[in-house]
């Protein structure tokens, strides 16, 4: 199962006024990891997805969406 | 280059081992430079030095270490070890054929498996960094 997710992380991060580095520091990952998640290159674990959603005060479904055919 | 000190040491250490190994291979094939044993000491010493420095940096910068070993970097590291396994297996089979056909000395083949084993995972990890899949 290799379908790529539709990612809305960047929009929510920008809305929260955070840089990639600040969000990365807040959830304990590298800036590169936040960058690759935003670009749909890396799919985070459930735990990290929950941490990101918690930090941005949104739900995981607000950050990630299955593609229409998914 | 990353601002994370642990990631920076990992990048420099990996690059150093790969460059040293490639230089040793090229020098040996061209029959120039120091002996194979000297190269082995150089590569081994660099590898041990990198491991010690990396261990110290992980202890001194725990928060940076956590970010440097996050799930994406851990996945890239795991992939590099898998690549290392297949690289060594492939090289072993090539060396086996060369030794059985008398084109390569068995002692030399055994000697060169060490650098391949040590340099293949860092080479793969470097490729992951260059592809933007790790830090």
Image: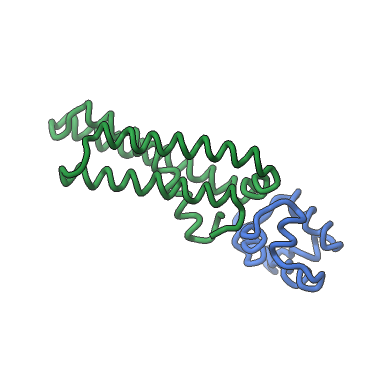
Chain colours: A blue, B green
> Which residue ends up furthest to the right in the rendered image?
A57
Q: Position of residue B97 (x, y in %)?
A: 21, 34
The front one of B97 and A23 is: A23
Residue drawn at 51 percent across, 45 percent down: B79
In the visual, does B65 lie left or right of B1?
right
The front one of A26 and B51 is: B51
Which image quarter: residue B40? top left
> Which residue ends up furthest to the left in the rendered image?
B102
Residue drawn at 71 percent across, 58 percent down: A24
In the visual, does B11 lie left or right of A60?
left
The front one of B5 and B95 is: B5
- Where, quadrant-wise, is the C terminus of chain B in this rendering? bottom right
Q: In this view, does A34 lie above or below B99?
A: below
Which image quarter: residue B48? top left
Total label count? 0
Q: Where is residue A25 in the image (x, y as percent from the top left)?
A: 73, 56
Q: Where is residue B113 in the image (x, y as percent from the top left)?
A: 32, 33
Q: Where is residue B35 in the image (x, y as percent from the top left)?
A: 21, 35
Which image quarter: residue B27? top left
């Amino acid at each position: 199962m290799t379908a790529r997710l539709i990612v809305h992380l960047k929009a929510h991060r920008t809305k929260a006024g955070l840089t990639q580095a600040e969000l990365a520091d807040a959830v304990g990952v590298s800036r590169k990891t936040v960058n690759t998640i935003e670009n749909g290159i890396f799919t985070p674990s459930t735990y990290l997805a929950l941490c990101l959603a918690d930090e941005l005060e949104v739900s995981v479904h607000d950050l990630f969406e299955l593609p229409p055919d998914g | 280059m990353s601002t994370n000190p642990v990631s920076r040491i990992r990048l420099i250490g990996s690059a150093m081992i790969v460059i040293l190994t490639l230089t040793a291979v090229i020098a040996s094939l061209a029959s120039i430079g120091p002996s194979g044993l000297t190269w082995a000491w150089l590569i081994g010493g660099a590898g041990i030095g990198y491991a010690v420095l990396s261990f110290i940096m992980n202890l001194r910068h725990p928060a940076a270490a956590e970010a440097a070993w996050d799930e994406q970097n851990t996945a890239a590291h795991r992939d590099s070890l898998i690549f290392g396994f297949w690289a060594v297996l492939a090289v072993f089979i090539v060396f086996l054929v060369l030794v059985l056909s008398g084109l390569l000395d068995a002692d030399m083949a055994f000697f060169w498996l060490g650098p391949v084993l040590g340099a293949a995972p860092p080479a793969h990890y470097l490729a992951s960094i260059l592809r933007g899949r790790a830090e």
